[in-house]
């Protein structure tokens, strides 16, 4: 398995140190790692080998080597690989939920318990947003793939991701103005970078679809 570090994480570290929010950021990063271990374990249980582990500004990310035999097992307009991707995507937030349950049952100090619960709730909400490539966006894309096929799934997912980022930008602008919290600003910047990258990939792929349709005519 390959290992990679996104060096933008050091910019985040400096900013959070300067704004005295480094403890919050460090806590979220620790549970983001645990979140990603949930993805990793479920992938291994499903027989999919991990390909790359990346440390990114918003946590940790594991990517997997696709098992091409799953492409041949049809599920609606998709395939078995879509089901496995949905399970893997769900396993991350589920892991954070399990951490919350364990914390409720533990004898941690009240303040420590609140921090752990708060960090994991944030990770669950953030990752389940209908925004690709977050877990919620991945689940949405694969469900749409099964229902409508790959081409429409990518189109709908891209459009829903754009609507989501616009709504989040509006809400975040109000929160940034009222709380002066730089963490919110940094999260929105990261989300926009993610959207722009995925949007470019979608547009390139859509051109290929159009070229294939022209050649069929």
Image (spheres, rainbow, N blue to C red):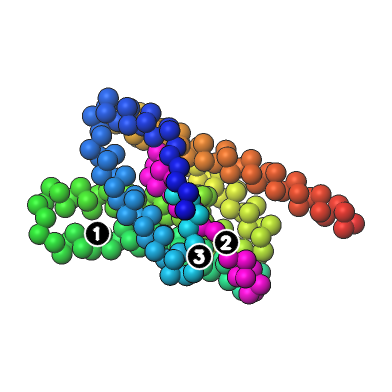
Marking on residue 66:
2
Dot 3 alpha-carbon crowd within 10 angstroms: few under 14, some 14 to 19, many 20 or more: many
Closer-to-camera residue (201/49): 49
Q: CA distance from mark 1 to mark 2?
A: 31 Å
Measured from the top left, where is residue 52 in percent x and y? 48, 51
**Image: magenta residue range:** 54-74
What residue is rendered at 64% in x and 44% in y? 201
Q: Earlier in the sequence, mark 1 or mark 2?
A: 2
Q: Are marks 1 and 3 in contact (CB under 8 Å)?
A: no
Q: Are marks 3 and 2 in contact (CB under 8 Å)?
A: yes
Mark 3 element type: loop
Give the residue furthest to the top.
18
Closer-to-camera residue (97/48): 48
Q: CA distance from mark 1 to mark 3?
A: 27 Å
Closer-to-camera residue (188/62): 62
- The residue beneath circle 1 is 100
Q: Earlier in the sequence, mark 3 or mark 2?
A: 3
Measured from the top left, where is residue 124 in percent x and y? 35, 54
- The residue beneath circle 3 is 48
Please indicate whether residue 146 sits to the left or right of residue 176 in the image: right
Q: From this viewpoint, is residue 25 visible?
A: yes
Mark 2 element type: loop
From the image, state whether disc 1 or disc 2 is nearer to you.
2
In this rendering, is residue 56 above or below 40? Answer: above
Q: Which image quadrant: the C terminus?
A: bottom right
Q: From this viewpoint, is residue 76 visible?
A: no
In this rendering, is residue 205 above or below 216? Answer: above
User: To which quarter of the image does residue 142 belong?
Assistant: bottom right
Measured from the top left, where is residue 13 in percent x and y? 32, 31
Dot 1 alpha-carbon crowd within 10 angstroms: few under 14, some 14 to 19, many 20 or more: many
Q: Earlier in the sequence, mark 1 or mark 3?
A: 3
Q: Are marks 1 and 2 in contact (CB under 8 Å)?
A: no
């Amino acid at each position: 398995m390959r290992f990679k570090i996104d060096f933008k994480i050091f910019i985040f570290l400096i900013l959070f140190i300067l704004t005295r929010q480094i403890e919050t950021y460090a806590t979220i990063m620790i549970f983001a790692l645990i979140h990603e271990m949930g993805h990793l374990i479920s992938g291994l249980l499903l027989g999919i080998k991990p390909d790359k582990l990346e440390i990114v500004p918003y946590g940790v990310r594991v990517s997997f080597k696709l098992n091409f035999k799953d492409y041949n097992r049809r599920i609606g307009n998709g395939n078995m690989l879509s089901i496995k991707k949905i399970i893997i995507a769900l396993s991350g937030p589920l892991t954070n939920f399990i951490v919350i349950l364990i914390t409720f049952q533990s004898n941690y100090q009240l303040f420590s318990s609140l921090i752990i619960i708060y960090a994991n709730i944030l990770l669950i909400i953030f990752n389940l947003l209908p925004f690709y490539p977050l877990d919620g966006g991945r689940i949405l894309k694969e469900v749409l793939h099964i229902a409508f096929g790959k081409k429409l799934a990518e189109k709908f997912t891209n459009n829903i991701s754009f609507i989501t980022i616009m709504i989040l930008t509006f809400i975040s602008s109000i929160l940034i103005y009222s709380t002066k919290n730089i963490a919110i600003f940094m999260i929105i910047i990261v989300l926009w970078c993610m959207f722009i990258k995925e949007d470019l990939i979608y547009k390139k792929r859509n051109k290929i679809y159009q070229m294939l349709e022209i050649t069929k005519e």
